[in-house]
């Protein structure tokens, strides 16, 4: 369904030097100095199959939201292709994309259900809006479909006339999900869909999302900070660090046989119940490297990695296959995996 290859988004940033001055300095040193660019998403490739749920995890600033904006065509990529059902939607500019059938086929549910709703639009209007805009339906034509969607997501039909401030967090989340489902998407991008909700409501909404996927057969790209949720809801997992994919595999491979030290650190930080055997928490020292013009010869995780050696400063490891579906970008992937398996 979705096949992303070499996708990048680089943002120009200012280093206080004008372009002519940079060229002059480069000329004086006999080597051109590249203009500084922030590598928010850097040469990312992955696929999502029909009906598959893929989790995207990584710390704040690793590029998750930028990737979501690229896939939903809210921003233009700097390079790469996004094949959706065989069509390269990255080649269509963001304005033209709004008029293509793929616009309805890829829908997104954003983090904060309150911020995503227009305070002056009722729940009915919010759910009917994509039907009016994308399917050109009149209000009367929308009614049966909106009622059906409300039932699908467990939103009480008698509350459809209410405004967002008259709804609870959980009800707003259901309206947002119904709105995303209205144009019958085949790919739903869920960007931290429950992080703004109470823990008890989170569980109910996650169960709803899981049931909807089984019932409707849609694919999910599920962005989350919560690895427990990803483990529960996703078939496959992608781990990002500083704009790059550092590990990808089935949920079982990533959680049981992690082969990248960053994934191991993330997993060690998952809260555990008292019944589960304790795992030694891996603390990562320092801050992530700068995403501005990262050195192409240095591993992005170098400096925070508990294993970092000279080799990691001399060549950046690329994603290498460990097993079918499982890849990791670390020079010591096999050793890391062996120690993960040994520790259980
Ligand atoms: N419009 C922009 N202009 C310049 N830099 C940007 C822009 N949007 C994002 N960035 C930068 O790109 C990098 C990735 O940001 P992004 O929001 O995608 O991360 P994230 O993983 O979604 O973080 P979070 O989990 O906190 O939302 C960050 O360094 C951020 O500062």
Image (cartoon, rainbow, N blue to C red):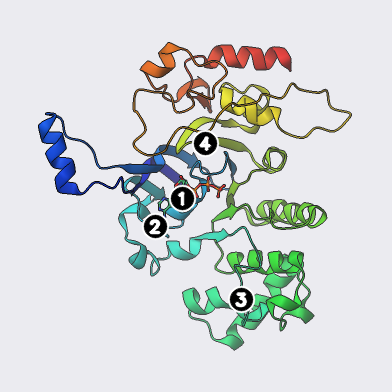
Q: Secondary structure at mark 1?
A: helix
Residue count near mark 4 (Cα–Cα under 10 Å), binned few <14, some 14–19, many ≥20: many
- Tell me the distance, in whole angstroms, between the alpha carbons under discs 4 and 2: 19 Å
- Tell me the distance, in whole angstroms, between the alpha carbons under discs 3 and 1: 25 Å
Q: Is residue 344 left or right of residue 240?
A: right
In the image, is the residue at mark 2 within 8 Å of ligand 1 by its beta carbon? yes
Q: Are marks 3 and 4 in contact (CB under 8 Å)?
A: no
Q: Are marks 1 and 4 in contact (CB under 8 Å)?
A: no
Q: Are marks 1 and 2 in contact (CB under 8 Å)?
A: yes
Give the answer, above or below, for where 1 lies relative to 319. Answer: below
Sequence-earlier tag: 1 or 4: 1
Q: Which residue is mark 2?
A: 75
Front-most of residues 324 and 178? 178
> Where does the image place residue 50, in percent across and percent down from the top left?
54, 47
Sequence-earlier tag: 1 or 2: 1
Q: Is residue 45 left or right of residue 254?
A: left
Sequence-earlier tag: 2 or 3: 2
Give the answer, above or below, for where 242 lies relative to 340. Answer: below
Residue count near mark 1 (Cα–Cα under 10 Å), binned few <14, some 14–19, many ≥20: some
- Tell me the distance, in whole angstroms, between the alpha carbons under discs 1 and 2: 8 Å
- Tell me the distance, in whole angstroms, between the alpha carbons under discs 1 and 4: 12 Å
Q: Are marks 4 and 2 in contact (CB under 8 Å)?
A: no
Q: Which residue is mark 4?
A: 240
Sequence-earlier tag: 3 or 4: 3
Q: Which residue is mark 3?
A: 126
Q: Which residue is mark 1?
A: 66
In the image, is the residue at mark 4 within 8 Å of ligand 1 by its beta carbon? yes
> Where does the image place residue 140, in percent across and percent down from the top left?
60, 88
- Tell me the distance, in whole angstroms, between the alpha carbons under discs 2 and 3: 23 Å
Nearest to the eye among marks 3 and 1: give it.
1
């Amino acid at each position: 369904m979705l096949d992303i290859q070499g996708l990048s988004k680089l943002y120009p940033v200012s280093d206080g030097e004008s372009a002519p001055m940079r060229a002059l300095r480069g000329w004086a040193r006999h080597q051109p100095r590249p203009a500084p660019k922030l590598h928010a998403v850097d040469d990312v490739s992955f696929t999502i199959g029909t009906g598959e749920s893929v989790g995207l995890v990584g710390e704040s600033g690793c590029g998750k939201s930028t990737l979501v904006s690229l896939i939903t065509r809210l921003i233009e990529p700097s390079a790469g292709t996004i094949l959706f059902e065989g069509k390269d939607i990255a080649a269509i500019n963001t304005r033209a994309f709004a008029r293509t059938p793929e616009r309805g086929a890829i829908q997104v549910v954003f983090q904060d259900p309150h911020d995503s709703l227009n305070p002056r639009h009722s729940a009915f209007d919010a759910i009917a809006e994509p039907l009016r805009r994308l399917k050109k339906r009149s209000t009367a034509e929308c009614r049966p479909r909106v009622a059906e969607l409300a039932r699908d997501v467990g939103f009480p039909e008698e509350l459809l006339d209410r405004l967002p401030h008259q709804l609870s967090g959980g009800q707003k989340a259901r309206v947002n999900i119904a709105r995303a489902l209205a144009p019958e998407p085949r790919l739903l991008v869920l960007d931290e869909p429950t992080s703004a909700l109470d823990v008890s409501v989170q569980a109910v909404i996650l169960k709803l999302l899981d049931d909807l996927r089984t019932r409707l057969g849609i694919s999910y790209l599920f962005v989350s900070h919560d690895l427990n949720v990803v483990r529960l809801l996703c078939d496959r997992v992608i781990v990002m660090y500083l704009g790059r994919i550092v590990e990808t595999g089935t949920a079982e491979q990533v959680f049981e046989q992690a082969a990248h030290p960053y994934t191991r650190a993330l997993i060690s930080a998952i809260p555990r119940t008292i019944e589960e055997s304790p795992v030694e928490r891996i603390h990562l020292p320092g801050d992530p490297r700068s995403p501005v013009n990262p050195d192409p010869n240095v591993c992005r995780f170098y400096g925070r990695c508990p294993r970092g050696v000279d080799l990691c400063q001399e060549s950046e490891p690329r994603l290498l296959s460990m097993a079918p579906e499982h890849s990791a970008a670390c020079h010591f992937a096999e050793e890391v995996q062996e120690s993960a398996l040994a520790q259980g």
